[in-house]
Image: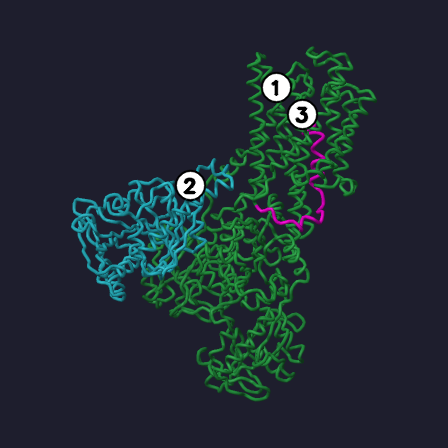
Amino acid sequence: MSQRQIHNLEVDDCFGLLRSSPAGLAETEAARRLAEFGANALADAPRLHWLRTLFKQFTNLFSLLLNLAALLCFIAAHLDGGADMRPLGVALLVVALLNALFTFAQEMRAERAMAALRELLPASATVLRDGVERSVLAASLVPGDVLRVSEGERMSCDARIVAASDLLVNNAPLSGESRHVHLRAEAVIDGRLSDAGNLLFAGASVVRGSGLALVYATGPRTEFGKIALLSTHVRRPPTPLEQEVARTVRVLTAIALTMGVLFFAYGLAMGRPLWLNVVFMLGIIVANVPEGLLPTLTLALAMGSVRLARKNVLCRSLNAVEALGAVEVICTDKTGTLTENRLAIAQVVAPLGATPLAAAHRLALLEAAMLACEIHGAQAQLSGDPLDVAIARMLQAEGGDALAVNATVTRHIAFDVQRRRAAGIGPWQGRVSFASKGAWEAVRDEVTTFMDGDAQRAADSAVLLRIDATVRQLAAAGARVIAVAVRTLDATAQHGSLTELESGLLLLGFLACDDPLRPEVPDALARCRAAGIAVVLITGDHPDTAHAIAVRAGLIEPDAAAQTVMRGEQLEALRERDLVAHLQAGTRIFARTTPEQKLKIVAALKHMGKVVAMTGDGVNDAPALRAADVGVAMGLSGTEVAREAAQVVLLDDNFASIVTGVEEGRTVFANVQKFTRYVLASNVPELVPFLLYVALPVPLALSVLQILAIDLGTDMLPAIGLGQEQPDGEAMRRKPRGRRERLLSLRLMLHSYLVLGLMQALWAMALFFAYLKRGGWVYGAPLAADHMLYRGATTLTLVSIVFMQVANLVGRRHATRGGLDAGLLANRLCMAGIALELVFVWAVVAWPPLMNALGTAPLDGPWLLAAVTGAPLFFFADLLIRRRWAAVL
Amino acid sequence: MLVFAYDGSLNGDWIAHYAARFALATARRELHLAHVHERAPAPELAGRIARIAEECQRLGVTLVTSIRDSGDGSVADGVLSLLAATPDSVLITGTRARPRNLSYLAGTVAAELLARAPCAVLALHVAHPAMLGQPGRVLLPFSMARPPSRAALPLVQLLAPELKELHVLVVQEVSRLRFRLLGTRGARRLIDGALARANAIEAQLREALLAGRCRLDVSAVVSDDAVKEILALAGRLRSRLLGLDASALPLSPGYGHPIEQLLRDSGSDVVLYRAAL
């Protein structure tokens, strides 16, 4: 049974389908339909949706943990009378609030994408109601309305053309194709609804002419509305870092709470007072929770995004910085991203053999091609379609006058996406001629003769096959091939139909157009290869052109197997699992594809468990940009809708900038691991005093306040410094980490807790007990909190931990090397962190306000020296262990 | 027997295209149009039915028309009385087209027929009249929360002649909290379970479709929001028809019921299907 849809219907049947007439609907009927079908508007988000989104940000574990830490500060302030921990608590609450607001702003971007889409639609329209033309709000249009469309207008609904006068529209927002399409009222025999030449879609603009259109879909039911819905319904998956941070927070919270509860129960069993047990439980939790980790992470990402912005990569979401680093596959466009989007005619060749034409023939071909062009402006500043401008420039270079030739055109038939060619009528070689320029496949059937030198010869099927070979040869070299054919006309034929005009064509030759590869691209692709990142090219171009560009860029080898290239039609017919198989088998180029097919490719890659970055610039790229792990929009050529839907905007549209982003992202993740190790290391010497205090009759070596002074005081700036380490050149030599590598891996925890932490704890506790022993303390004897011996001992513990953290900071700068060789001065924040730690040490032993606040006391030179000695001991022991057990740690 | 409950509305005209196409898939190529009116039939009714008859004739489908008064009963009673003699029929009806802040089903004839009709029921909502009842690409979502059933088979068989692409989606719904805490491995395990169900459904449908003219594909997702997943996939696949199992549909589904949400937010046509009671 043949397909029959609205574009296949005659105009009368269309009116029947929608119970309308050429006079339009009656006002009463229009009002009834408005109540029945709803307004012609893109849906708003549900009321109070923003409130729910905001609330969600305060209930995630990240936020809860920060709030818990703040609560602990307030409790500590309450319990530890002399000290005021409230400012720290407030600071943590502010961090939690900022994080929540930032994430909220990101999530609300989907709404902004919808707003950007809405702005593409007009506010009013001209309709026929009761046979009278009137201007109405676009929102009040209903199925069955008859619209009057004219030059400059934009569509707000989908409609079937019922009358047209030289109607030329631009469907770019929907099709992504910036060329103009001629629309007519006649029924179309076959073809898809979305490509029909008698339908006007919402978002399209009328470039020329006028007509009447019968509305058949409004609001979310339009094709444009479906893109808008898809842009909001497609959920962005959590980035690998978001997943890892959530997991890290869960693990650390679980460890902290479990230990706290266990020791609380132990204390109760030992008969300690309840209140004292509560205090120690809180101490154990505070010691276990790395309060500074999450704010440091946010800062590291924020500063990473600033660095990326300087490199033309604008991150619209903080997590996108790191997500770029986890990318395993980059799906990229060709035009403008891999190439310069600067169309130039590289060659003018003969129909057979791809040999360059002689000067006279070249000039004749260019003049014929010019008849099928439409250009404006002055000689120096031509404007119009990039191909038309390129032809005009070449004609001028050959000594012709492009504007003069173009001015002689008596009839112009604009480029038609379906027909894939443009045409014009004007004088050529002294005779009125019809000239056609377009894809060879599009004019092939109408060519009956061809130019062979100065002679015209018949183009029989054997010749046509040889011409096919010429075209393939040119396309395989990466050229976009445009055929130019003419036919001389007599006076009566000039006004014939297009079908009549386009017969018996004489093929003059081909224009081989070139869009040069960006010079940075081959190197960027080589870096991707070294970094284990697969690059997938998705383009609307001919497969041979795409293949040639891919070879030239170094994306594939020249002798790559045929299965590396897939056409859009093949892709359309594939099941998702079969597409996965093709991708696994090495398909890297998708040619003649539509923007909608990008989503299918993203879905298949994600089914393979890959972290995917996808580039896009058009309105209909928005769903794919949202579905990818990292949506990358083009800042120069991209639409506002694409930019709003993406997480990353390339300010220079350059593929190489994505690779720079990946390197930065990988560096950020490596830095996050560095400062996580750094921060977790100090948790053990903070925890051990509590464990000993609960288990043995010994004084507490660190107070809750002193722990927080390390976690939120001295540890913060050095950790931020580690977050700013520069790329070390190794980032792009490693395989992508994808979703597999853990932020809080077993290796990292073993190294932080059992190596770094334990070393710090041993040295700090050894000094603590040595100080007490030297001061006359006897094992088991209680010591008052304000006893100078006790204050001195806790001061020594605190100071020794801070010194060892200085050594830890240096050691964390490199995984296997010492860290000093990387040039300590190169990282000013690290230097500032070390300076802060040293000032802090001075302040806790010599500055009364802080000494009173933290309960510390002055230390003698030998004890200070003993504390300082811990740093080099720790540093070299750590270095030896890392070198000895590099594979494990 | 294929019975089409026609209400004489514009929406009814659009559903008639589906009904006529469905009739093509039956052995007898016959469509019974039943119109039950509460008061006098609308004056334009005859003209409208004539247009449907014209379409049926063009397709080679025989149209049998019965028009009756609902009498003391409701419109649904009238339709049901026509079905009493043929419980093995398939009844085609339409949900009403209404703006988003009103229910599509609650209190409608369609809801009553879905609840009471002894035969299989298809309730259609046409969002896109331009397709003229030929959706081509169809998405059938299923939930892991419900036991597997064969309720979709009659619909698929009726759609078969026009079908180009049939996509089966199985959604494993989890609570919002669980969804947020779900790790990669846990999600993979759930997806694998849903995929196994999807493959089983696909095998069943492939058998029902007999010939391999239509492309079948499956996917599975884990989600805390099934409606969003269905709408997103429908958009991604550019599905023109969503087929939803309405077996457990309450007589008056609330505004937040997933089927109501899908009827409200879908940009494509929707068909609710239910097997014979």
Q: Residue furthest front?
A: A884
Identify the magenta region. Answer: A709-738
Q: Residue furthest right?
A: A861
> For the residues tagged 3 and 2, is the chain the same?
no
> For the residues tagged 3 and 1, is the chain the same?
yes
Decide: is A190 above or below B79: below
Colour scheme employed for the rendering of this structure: by chain
Q: Which mark is residue A686?
A: 3
Q: Secondary structure at mark 2?
A: strand
The chain drawn in cyan is B
Q: Chain of mark 2?
A: B
- Quote the CA–CA distance across marks 3 and 1: 12 Å
Badge 3 vs badge 2, beta-carbon distance below 8 Å: no
- Quote the CA–CA distance across marks 3 and 2: 43 Å
Q: Which residue is mark 2?
A: B173
Q: Residues within 10 Å of mark 3 (few under 14, many from 20)?
A: many
Q: Is residue B242 magenta?
A: no
Decide: is A566 above or below A770: below
Q: Which mark is residue A280?
A: 1
